Amino acid sequence: MSYLAVSQSSVKHLLIVVVRLIVGGIFFISGLLKVIDPDTFRKTLSTHGLFSTGTIHLISLVLPYVEIAVGLLFALGFRTKVTGRIIACLLILFTIEGAFAFALGSAVDCGCFPTEGGGEPIGIKFFVRNGLLILSTLWVTEGQSEPSSDSNKSFEWYKVS
């Protein structure tokens, strides 16, 4: 019967891996979609009414690759605290930008997952989702009782002890 017993730390570690894979996967896919169709992402940013044309161009060139990199690294468990903090900061910035665009009434689409037919409008679902993603990321990066256990161990996403 002892083979069925699962320690609480094993369950927590498994949940951390699942959250990392979900959050990292969301960032990876979001960035990949923006790389595949940068014009749609640029058009979406222009509807927010917050950025100049040059800033929109710069954001559309840099942000997708940052999202891909931090998403992949976070999902794989590489420097989890650092990549998680970057993701949390990006999510906070996205949420603030979305709040300004929402307040101005000019945003049609959040730009998270650009699609030709239009994506998700900025609204309560956007803010709830971002809030949950921020909390989940902070739980993984800051909620550990021990100092960073991944500082000397890279790519241990598979290990559940």
Image: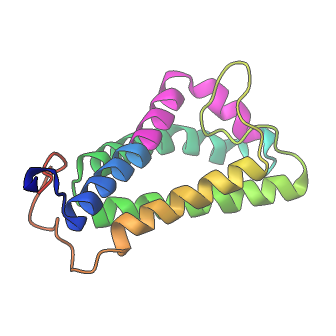
* Residue farthest along the right direction in this orientation: 105
Q: Is residue 33 part of the magenta span, yes or no?
A: yes
Q: Please give the name of the residue rendered at 61% of the width and 40% of the height, measured from the top-left corner.
A: 112
Where residue 35 sits: x, y (%)?
Answer: 48, 28
Q: Main secondary structure of the magenta part?
A: helix
In the image shown, does 94 or 26 lie closer to the viewer? 26
**Rendering quarter of residue 152:** bottom left
Looking at the rendered image, the quarter that the C terminus falls into is: bottom left
Identify the magenta region. 25-46
Q: Is residue 146 above or below residue 79?
A: below
Q: Position of residue 3 (x, y in %)?
A: 9, 51
> What residue is rendered at 69% in x and 63% in y?
96
In the rendered structure, the answer to whether residue 16 lies left or right of residue 92 reads: left
Residue at image point 35% right, 68% down = 141
Residue 94 highlighted magenta (yes or no): no
Percent position of residue 95, x then y: 66, 58
Front residue (pair 14, 19): 14
Q: Position of residue 136 (x, y in %)?
A: 46, 60
Q: Does residue 131 appear left or right of residue 85 in this picture? A: right
Nearer to us in this view, 160 or 126? 160
User: Would residue 159 be found to the left or right of residue 35 on screen?
Assistant: left
**Can residue 51 be seen in this snapshot?**
no
Say whether residue 47 is visible: yes
Residue at the extreme front: 1
Q: How many marks?
A: 0
